[in-house]
Image (cartoon, rainbow, N blue to C red):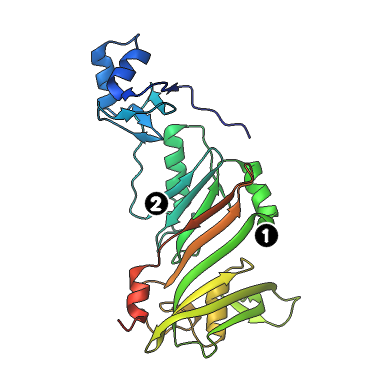
Amino acid sequence: MNYHTPDNIREYKVVEETTLLPFLYSVLDNLSKTEVKSMLKYRHVAIKGEAVTQFDTPLEPGDTVQVNFGRSFYRFSNPQVRIIYEDDWLVVIEKASGLLSVANENSKDRNAFKIVTDYVRHGNPDAKLFVCHRLDQYTSGILMFSKDEELMRELRSNWDFYVKERRYMCVTENVPSVREDTIESFLAQNSRLQMFSTDNGEEGSRAVTHYRVIQSRGRYALVDVEIFTGKKNQIRVHMSDIGCPIAGDMKYGAETNPARRLMLHNYRLVFIHPVTGVLMRFSLSTPPVFRKLTSDR
């Protein structure tokens, strides 16, 4: 799993304080000043992975300037995907509600996997991407991909070792009678592809969900959820089991859709980086509509 800068991209280390254009003149002395200015204008120069066009951008010793002699550096922009973190091995994103994690029969191109794959291939046409885990289509939040198949298999095979915390914020119809509790059952799937809880361990897979009510107003509650197993539709089934389906989740018993979306958001992911061993922490804010619907203020 050794990664390198694509052949068309060269990196130049800054050794003394200066500004960008004079630095480019010095390191690209085989090009004319007009050619250097053109490279800068058309986004062939990047600092810290971000394309820059400003000629007087300040540089400090230790900075790295990248020059792409092939294509321009890509400025990623997508209304349904935000890149939170990227290194040589992983890409972590925020996925919007309504976007599939991966393709299905009805959507080959409009999914997070395809969008992020196109992004990483812009910088390196030979790059590949692999799915580490998934979020339901209408669940928003943190999603992680691997750039290496072996690494993906390592993460999936030892998920409980690497992943230390997965937390969600949701809005439920009805307020749980017990403000904080742990729900445990075995989840199985029926002929309609709907998950359900059972006490039969031979019929389903063990699922454990801990929840805590944050605030409530009327029939709606804002609930912080931590999952200790990652089963399909786990939170949706467990909250429905206690008579508090997630708002907007008609599949599992909700009667209302106040935000015109499933009100479930994966806001926190903590894991050990499988290559560096560093504990990685990612957190997102709660969607404003979640708090607005459940606050008395």
Locate the C terminus and report the quarter of the image it occupies.
bottom left
Q: Is residue 283 in view?
A: yes
Mark 2 Cα shell of 10 Å, populated few (<14), some (14-19), many (≥20): some
Locate the N terminus and report the quarter of the image it occupies.
top right
Q: Quick check: 285 above or below 222?
A: above
Viewer-closest of 30 and 173: 30
Outermost residue, right direction? 202
Q: Quick check: 161 above or below 243?
A: above
Looking at the image, which residue is at 36% across and 43% down? 76
The image quarter in which residue 36 lies? top left
Looking at the image, which residue is at 71% across and 83% down? 199
Q: Please, what secondary structure does the residue beneath circle 2 have?
A: strand
Q: Mark 1 points at which residue?
A: 160
Viewer-closest of 201 and 271: 271
Outermost residue, top direction? 30
Q: Mark 2 points at which residue?
A: 82
Viewer-closest of 96 and 16: 16
Looking at the image, which residue is at 33% across and 19% down? 23
Q: The residue under label 1 is which amino acid type?
A: Asp
N-terminal-most mark, 2 or 1: 2
Q: Where is residue 224? Give x, y as percent.
A: 50, 74
Q: Is residue 260 in view?
A: no
Q: The residue under label 2 is which amino acid type?
A: Arg
The image quarter in which residue 229 lies? bottom right
Q: Where is residue 8? Give x, y as percent.
A: 44, 22
What label does residue 274 carry, if any?
A: none
Q: Total label count?
A: 2
Mark 1 Cα shell of 10 Å, populated few (<14), some (14-19), many (≥20): some
Q: Please, what secondary structure does the residue beneath circle 1 have?
A: helix
Viewer-closest of 233 and 2: 2
